[in-house]
């Protein structure tokens, strides 16, 4: 079992920044890939970013590339999402997820085994 708890969401003006954190417990954190997804009202949950178990490989949705950065600290069992130059269309509930498959991190939400409860990010124009 893996438990995931997100934090760091909030209300920010367009152009601002937020850093989300996701603390993991349960299985050995460094053994699995991690991803961030988001879901806006009335929309499907979509991929945002993913990182390999070692942190050496990262992947981003085109909509956030160059603005968001995913990172992890295996000593702290935590994955981060630094979000810069935020836009109103980034408004959503953000979820972290754990993929126990040791291969390349997936962009597909169906590949992830465990999910956090989500944290709200609201970007005002």
Image: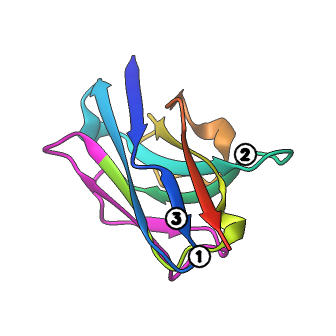
Q: Which residue is mark 2?
A: 45
Spatial CA span between label 1 and label 3: 7 Å
Is the C terminus in the top left, top right, bottom left or bottom right quadrant? Answer: bottom right
Spatial CA span between label 2 and label 3: 21 Å
Q: What's the residue at 56%, 78% (across, down)?
A: 65
Q: Which residue is mark 1?
A: 14
Is the N terminus in the top left, top right, bottom left or bottom right quadrant? Answer: top left
Is 19 placed above or below 116 here? below
Q: Which badge, 2 or 1, comes first in the chain's sequence?
A: 1
Judging depth in this view, the residue of 62 and 28 nearest the camera is 62
The answer to whether one can see residue 82 in this image is no
Spatial CA span between label 2 and label 1: 22 Å
Quadrant housing residue 87: bottom right
Q: Secondary structure at mark 1?
A: loop
Within 10 Å of disc 2 (Cα), the crowding (few <14, some 14-19, many 20+) is some
Within 10 Å of disc 1 (Cα), the crowding (few <14, some 14-19, many 20+) is some
Picture coordinates of residue 111 (x, y %)?
A: 61, 39
Q: Which badge, 2 or 3, comes first in the chain's sequence?
A: 3
Q: Disc 2 vs disc 3: which is toward the camera?
A: 3
Picture coordinates of residue 43 (x, y %)?
A: 83, 48
Q: Magenta stretch: give its range.
A: 53-78
Q: Which residue is mark 3?
A: 12
């Amino acid at each position: 079992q893996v438990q995931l708890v997100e934090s760091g969401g909030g209300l920010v003006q367009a152009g601002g920044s937020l850093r989300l954190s996701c603390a993991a417990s349960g299985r050995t954190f460094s053994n699995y890939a991690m991803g961030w997804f988001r879901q806006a009202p009335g929309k499907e949950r979509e991929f945002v970013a993913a990182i390999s178990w070692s942190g050496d490989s990262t992947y981003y949705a085109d909509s956030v590339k160059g603005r968001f950065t995913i990172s992890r600290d295996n000593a702290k069992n935590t994955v981060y999402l630094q979000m810069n130059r935020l836009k109103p269309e980034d408004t959503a509930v953000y979820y972290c997820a754990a993929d126990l498959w040791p291969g390349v991190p997936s962009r597909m939400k169906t590949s992830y085994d465990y999910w956090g409860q989500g944290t709200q990010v609201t970007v005002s124009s």
